[in-house]
Image (cartoon, coloured by chain):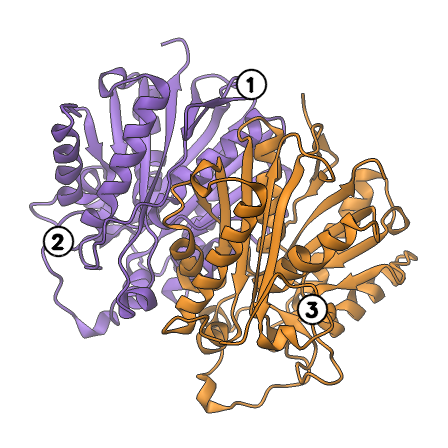
Chain colours: A purple, B orange
């Protein structure tokens, strides 16, 4: 059976279930509006480790373990793990999951990783290749800052368009059977390069990718924004959120008040000194795992579109004058029987 | 239908076809034993670009374009591209493919990328999620050397256990229908950490992962090495090749003369000053795309096991004293009607 629905979307006939999920974060995230939602908040930026890279790995491992525990699954019994992160060579994921003994696919989608891993895990379960599959990712402000920007001790000034890398992780375990939340559609993004070269303006670089993916999603499915109780982009921040609305406004399509961005939701933009909002793989991951899925279970939303966004650049590509290509992957999550 | 065959293997009922493939490389690879096999050899290490990072991207783009052309497909008509590389944030792949306009999944499997991308592409086609899917990757000696080791100008001495990063790329396009070569099974590796910390001895770090994946493949499928006309590991090099044989010898399993390693095949180890052999994402990718698949079409081998290997470390993890976790993914390729 060919499951393709239009150019970039597939419909999942079996609608894999979300068996369990978790979302954890750091101190700053625990001071934001979602403070009550997280499964765990670390007061210690090192998470008990000696370096921030190991802290990031520890956090991902902890979040993964929590999700496995809630699903009642031994990590080694998982049929696949899809994981990735922002560190060079995705080491926080591979070190976090190296003792799991489960079949492992490393992925790289920058801050779109949660949607990419969820997409692939969902297709693996739907296609009969796996009975269970885990999607997990995270990011850490301190490890990202020193890898992408400056040593923290330098105390560099950040322009108003910049975003704050979220210290957080999210994990979702999919499977057959189960009840409650299900993944029904996956829309895979194509790389979109709008020619933005300012690495301190990721929202502007990623918004055109989000626009393209959402637009093709609506076209492929014959749906409109009104068909969703909520639409979440990954980490466009306040600026990217507005750009995306403007792009749709031009087409005469109203995203409306149900359109939110995880990078805006996670911090209080007026008091937390994060400029345009949160970013990083962990941003949409921990907002999904700590907030969105919980709210869906409570009936706040019954059908949502989760569209994580990523910037596919590196410090080297920026230093060599390259633009910042963006990408956005989207998944539809529905509450069964709602 | 549940397609899982044992713990880590899936059987692909539709056996997706290899519609087209390509393998290109650099000057040094063109001086090795496979010189006549490559589709293109660049005399210029810059591939006409200004930096080695852009050269790597150019090479991947060129290889991808060649495979698309041979398949008679417009790049934008592909249902998925799976790609990744060794550069930080996988930028050579994303910049190579950013103009393709095809749904794109970035992956990170270090030097196992060709097998990982091929595995995922094969399951997407088999499962009805895609009519066509491309797996593509590459690596470049100069960009890898300066990112992972030293500036080339430094002229550092390399220990005898070290390997030479291949300048090369490979691309394979899978689809339904077609005739000739097909992918029948996929075995996904779990991360294996044997505690090796010497970043100049990747063969020793990756051989235990290859051992685990091949062993589970034989167990899952009920097959033995004798069921394959040839078994190829990715880039264990001469040392890792011998370690893998020794590990199987201990179990009383003979890998035999049909067991080869792409890192050994690509260079003349006695004259080309590459020490233990070739490595890098491009190693197994260009050996597959330029040599193995062509030889299969000619009937040299009818059923092979392609098992690319990767080391999931970074310079930072090594500097922080971490070990080098390895991974190995394997796919079975068969010649139809043979």
Q: Dot 1 surroundings within 10 Å: few (below 14), some, or many (20 or more)?
A: some
The chain letter for the residue carrying disc 3 is B
Mark 2 highlights which residue? A161
The chain letter for the residue carrying disc 1 is A
Helix, strand or loop at mark 3:
helix
Which residue is found at the position 63% from the left and 31% from the top? B176
Above-or-below relation of A290 to B272: above
Above-or-below relation of A115 to A127: below
Mark 1 highlights which residue? A177
Above-or-below relation of A96 to B317: above
Q: Image quadrant of residue A180?
A: top left
**In this view, the mark in front (3 or 1):** 3
The chain letter for the residue carrying disc 2 is A
Viewer-proximal residue, B328 or B191?
B328
**In this view, the mark in front (1 or 2):** 2
Q: Dot 2 surroundings within 10 Å: few (below 14), some, or many (20 or more)?
A: many
Where is residue B98 drawn, in percent x and y?
37, 50
Helix, strand or loop at mark 2:
loop
C-alpha separation, residue under disc 1 versus residue under disc 2: 44 Å
Asked if labels 2 and 1 touch by Cβ distance under 8 angstroms, the answer is: no
Q: Which mark is residue B263?
A: 3
C-alpha separation, residue under disc 3 versus residue under disc 2: 46 Å
Marks 3 and 2 on same chain: no
Q: Quadrant of the N terminus of chain B?
A: top right
Q: Is residue B172 left or right of residue A242?
A: right
Asked if labels 2 and 3 touch by Cβ distance under 8 angstroms, the answer is: no
Where is residue B132 drawn, in percent x and y?
55, 35
Where is residue B314 drawn, in percent x and y?
48, 67
């Amino acid at each position: 059976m060919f499951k393709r629905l239009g150019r970039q979307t597939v419909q999942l006939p079996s609608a894999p279930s979300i068996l369990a999920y978790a979302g954890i974060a750091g101190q700053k995230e625990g001071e934001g509006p979602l403070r009550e939602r997280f499964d765990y908040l670390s007061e210690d930026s090192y998470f008990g480790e000696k370096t921030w890279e190991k802290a990031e790995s520890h956090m991902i491992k902890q979040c993964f373990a929590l999700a496995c525990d809630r699903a009642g699954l031994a990590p080694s019994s998982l049929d696949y793990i899809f994981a990735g992160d922002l560190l060079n060579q995705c080491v926080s994921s591979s070190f976090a999951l190296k003792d799991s003994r489960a079949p492992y696919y490393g992925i790289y989608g920058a801050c779109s990783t949660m949607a990419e891993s969820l997409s692939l895990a969902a297709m693996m379960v739907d296609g009969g290749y796996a009975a269970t599959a885990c999607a997990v990712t995270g990011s850490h402000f301190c490890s990202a800052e020193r890898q992408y920007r400056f040593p923290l001790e330098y105390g560099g000034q950040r322009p108003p368009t910049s975003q704050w890398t979220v210290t957080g992780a999210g994990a979702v375990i999919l499977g057959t059977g189960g009840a409650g939340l299900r993944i029904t559609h996956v829309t895979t993004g194509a790389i979109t390069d709008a020619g933005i070269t300012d690495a301190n303006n990721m929202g502007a670089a990623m918004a055109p990718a989000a626009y393209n993916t959402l637009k093709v999603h609506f076209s492929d499915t014959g749906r409109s924004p009104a068909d969703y109780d909520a639409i979440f982009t990954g980490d466009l921040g306040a600026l990217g959120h507005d750009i995306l609305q403007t792009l749709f406004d031009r087409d005469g399509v109203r995203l409306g008040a149900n359109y939110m961005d995880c990078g805006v939701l996670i911090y209080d933009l007026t008091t937390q000194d994060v400029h345009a909002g949160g970013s990083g793989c962990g941003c949409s991951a921990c907002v999904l795992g700590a907030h969105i899925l919980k709210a869906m279970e409570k009936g706040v939303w019954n059908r949502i579109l989760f569209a994580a966004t990523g910037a596919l650049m590196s410090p080297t590509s920026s230093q060599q004058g390259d633009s910042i290509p963006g990408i956005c992957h989207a998944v539809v999550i529905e509450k069964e029987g709602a």
